[in-house]
Image (cartoon, rainbow, N blue to C red):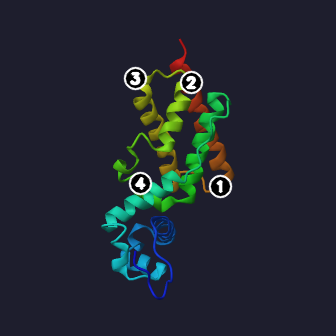
């Protein structure tokens, strides 16, 4: 691993992805370039290509990093309804903290299609607690994801109140609808 004379330390993927997430949040996807990232990291732009092969690969890394860092609720023995609400709130908070990353991820669905990601594994665990049979996990999780992602999209596009407290109440109502609907779906 080459070390820049200006920098004094070798690059690593975590530093690259963390800095890229920050730059992307400051300037959007279009504001993130290999040159800007290299300048921020105080390295020659070509040094980045030892770690990521292209800007597209960098964006994939940024999104994976952001998704992996999303706090998902632990299996703490709470009722599934509370765990589902906690996951919905974590997703909403994460989308608000990383709007540029969130927007990019949701226009490139392959970035979140990996069902091994912690968000999906947590949702599957909660859905099993709610009584959703294994053959229905994927379909149910996709419906719930679309519902919550649609809410976040409507919020970020200005289709809802600008009042943060009203948005919080509206999101809470949306989560209650999801929980009630899921309870009705899974009851005999």
Q: Residue at x 42, y 36 (%)?
A: 142
Answer few, some or many: residues within 10 Å of disc 2's Cα (few below 14, many 20 plus, some between 14 and 19): some
Q: Are marks 2 and 3 in contact (CB under 8 Å)?
A: no
Answer few, some or many: residues within 10 Å of disc 3's Cα (few below 14, many 20 plus, some between 14 and 19): few
Q: Earlier in the sequence, mark 3 or mark 4?
A: 4
Q: Can you tell which of label 3 and label 4 is closer to the viewer? A: 3
Disc ID at residue 105: 4
* Quadrant occupied by the N terminus: bottom left
Numbered disc 2: secondary structure? loop
Q: Position of residue 68 (x, y in %)?
A: 50, 52
Q: Earlier in the sequence, mark 2 or mark 3?
A: 2
Please say if 43 is above or below 128: below
Q: Is 50 displayed left or right of 151 in the figure?
A: left
Name the residue tied to disc 2.
130
Report the Cα–Cα distance between label 2 and label 1.
Answer: 33 Å
Please say if 1 is above or below 146: below
Q: Earlier in the sequence, mark 1 or mark 4?
A: 4
Q: Can you tell which of label 1 and label 3 is closer to the viewer? A: 3
Work out whether residue 41 or residue 149 is closer to the camera in this orientation and state it.
41
Q: Is 151 displayed left or right of 81 in the figure?
A: left
Question: Can residue 102 be seen at all in this image of the molecule?
Answer: no
Name the residue tied to disc 3.
135
Report the Cα–Cα distance between label 3 and label 4.
Answer: 26 Å
Name the residue tied to disc 1.
163
Q: Earlier in the sequence, mark 1 or mark 3?
A: 3
């Amino acid at each position: 691993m080459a070390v820049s004379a200006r920098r004094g330390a070798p690059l690593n993927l975590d530093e690259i992805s963390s800095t890229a997430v920050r730059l992307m949040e400051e300037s959007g996807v279009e504001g993130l370039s290999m040159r800007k990232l290299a300048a921020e990291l105080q390295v020659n732009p070509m040094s980045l290509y030892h770690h990521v092969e292209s800007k597209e690969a960098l964006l994939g890394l940024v999104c994976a990093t952001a998704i992996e860092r999303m706090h998902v609720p632990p299996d703490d023995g709470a009722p599934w309804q509370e765990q589902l609400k906690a996951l919905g709130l974590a997703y909403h908070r994460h989308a608000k903290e990383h709007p540029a990353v969130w927007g990019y991820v949701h226009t490139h669905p392959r970035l979140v299609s990996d069902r091994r990601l912690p968000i999906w594994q947590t949702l599957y665990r909660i859905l099993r607690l709610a009584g959703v049979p294994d053959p229905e996990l994927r379909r149910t999780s996709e419906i719930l994801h679309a519902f919550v992602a649609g809410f976040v999209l409507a919020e970020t596009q200005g289709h809802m109140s600008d009042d943060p407290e009203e948005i919080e109440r509206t999101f809470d109502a949306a989560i209650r609808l999801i929980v009630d609907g899921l309870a009705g779906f899974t009851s005999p």
